[in-house]
Amino acid sequence: MALPGWSTFRFEGIGTKWEISTPGQLAPALSTELLDTVEAYDRTWSRFRADSLVSTLSRAPGSITLPEHAAGLQELYSALHRLSQGAVTPLIGSSLEQLGYDAEYSLSPVGMPQAPPRWEDVLEWTGTAMIATEPLVLDIGAAGKGQLVDLLGGVLLAAGHGDFLVDGSGDMLHSGSHPITVALEHPYNPKQAIGTVELDNAALCASASNRRAWGDGLHHVLDGTTGRPIHTTVATWTMAASALVADGLATALFMMEPAPLEEEFDFSWLRVSSAGTATFSAGFEGRLFT
């Protein structure tokens, strides 16, 4: 999302498009640092590249030491896994591969949907330490892009940029004295909006079943207890202090009711069902079009 009068640094990373908007142009060294941050994250977490750190666990059981940011990711995943009764899991990669969303993007299912292994049976993840007792296909897509948004925001702040918008294909982090108005993409028509929301020194993240869809009813938002795509919800938006939390909660809202999440997290939300109805929290101060 480019902002009028601001400079926008555009690039691609972790399989999606990025825009970083600031009042002035970024110094070349800072642009390079942002790109290096994205590359380092991808080299750690991507299940689509054989040289990533987590891919070593897909070939054989063993242990790896992750970067410091893994501790925050583990804490969020543990909470969402518990609250969703296993529906949110970092082990969903094997189920996605079963349905054809694999490293080669074959998009051809190799059988019926399968639930991934139970986290407690095969994986010990404590902070930056991860131990797998059998080969595992890790996928942190439920919250990883949001965390990378936060990491890029941290790079900008450390360089003295207090006004910015980091936009990772709809997962956003805003900082500064001028709030922005963001359109909420229609879940069935990306050229239309169902409403708008004001973003003011916070994160806004979305999850939608149409973003990565293929085949007959196949998309990337799976229930970790069954390995099947979820069809009762088609789109969610969440606002929180960090994009990590907002991203994870946007995914969790596909799988569970908001109330248990609201007991542990400070966030606001909007959810659209497959029947076309919209529900939202009292704190989601947006405008929905009729």
Image: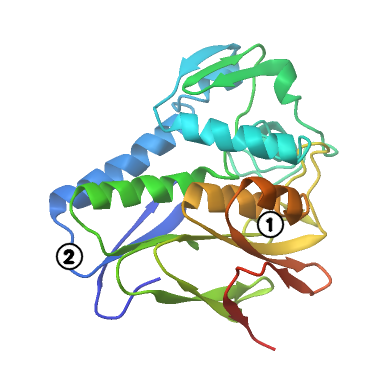
The percent coordinates of residue 254 (x first, y second) are: 73, 54
Please name the residue that numbered disc 1 is placed on.
213
Rendered residue at 18%/54% (across/down): 160
Question: In the rendered view, does 86 fall on the left or right side of 207?
Answer: right
The quarter of the picture where residue 132 lies is top right
| Label annotation for residue 44 | none
- The percent coordinates of residue 46 (x first, y second) are 50, 35
How far apart, in angstroms, are the residues tagged by discs 2 and 1? 36 Å
Q: Local crowd at mark 1 within 10 Å, few (<14), some, or many (≥20)?
A: some
Q: Is residue 65 left or right of residue 34?
A: right
Marks 2 and 1, the one that precedes in the sequence = 2
Q: Give the quadrant of the C terminus.
A: bottom right
Q: Residue furthest bottom?
A: 290
Disc 2 residue type (three-letter): Gln
Check disc 1 and report its element: helix, strand or loop.
Answer: strand
Q: Which x, y percent locates residue 119?
A: 71, 24
In the depicted structure, whether residue 39 falls above or below residue 249: above
Q: Is residue 69 left or right of residue 246?
A: left
Q: Is residue 103 visible?
A: no
Judge left or right: residue 51 versus residue 124: left
The residue depicted at 43 percent of the width and 30 percent of the height is 44
Q: Nearer the viewer, mark 2 or mark 1?
A: 2
Q: Nearer the viewer, residue 276 or 177?
A: 177
Mark 2: secondary structure: loop
Looking at the picture, the colour scheme in use is rainbow
Q: Disc 2 vs disc 1: Cβ atoms closer than 8 Å?
A: no
- Residue 25's disc is 2
Q: Quadrant of the N terminus?
A: bottom left
The quarter of the displayed image where residue 57 is located: top right
Amino acid tagged 1: Ala
